[in-house]
Image (cartoon, grey):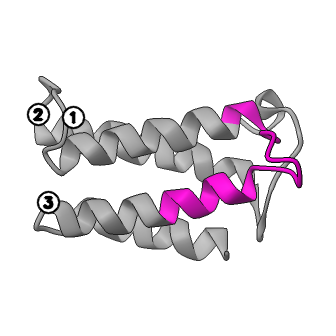
Amino acid sequence: MHLQKAIERLNYLIDNKPNDLSKHAIAHSLLSGFEAENRNIDGAMIDGYAEEKISSVRIWFNMLCGIGEDGYTEDKIRENLRSDLYKLELIISSDDLSLELPSAKI
């Protein structure tokens, strides 16, 4: 999976309507690719910080698409989603999740 293209597609989804199950399914599929890239051959997580950001982006997309309870405005959800997606983007390098310590990158 080309992770940078997935980031670009996720950014596109943030800014475009409708916020429906179709958008949620696309985001979920893209994020599943990130999870797959963040697992070693035994299925163990490679980068815990990346896993946290993938999960966080997934939760914000859930809220954006009306799944789950939130209490946030749509603008605040988009702001938080962009922030966590940016942090995930910092973690990746070309096509691989980086094994460097997250503190060295952010």
State the residue at coordinates (15%, 27%). 69
Cβ–Cβ under 8 Å for marks 1 and 3: no
How far apart in space, not on screen, are marks 2 and 3 (Cα)?
13 Å
User: Magenta stretch: residue 85 in it?
Assistant: no
* Residue type at numbered disc 3: Asn
Q: Position of residue 1 (x, y in %)?
A: 67, 75
* Residue type at numbered disc 2: Thr
Q: Position of residue 102 (x, y in %)?
A: 77, 33
Q: Position of residue 92 (x, y in %)?
A: 72, 56
Which corner quadrant of the image does residue 21 belong to? bottom left
* Residue type at numbered disc 1: Lys
Residue 86 sits above or below residue 30 on the image: above
Residue reaching furthest to the front = 42
Please state which of the two labelled residues, at mark 2 or mark 3, is closer to the viewer. 3
State left or right for residue 44 relative to residue 51: right
State the residue at coordinates (89%, 55%). 41
How far apart in space, not on screen, are marks 1 and 3 (Cα)?
15 Å
Q: Nearer the viewer, residue 25 or 9?
A: 25
Residue, disc 3: 19
Residue reaching furthest to the top = 71
State left or right for residue 93 relative to residue 63: right
How far apart in space, not on screen, are marks 2 and 1 (Cα)?
5 Å
Residue 2 sits above or below residue 75 on the image: below
Label number found at residue 36: none
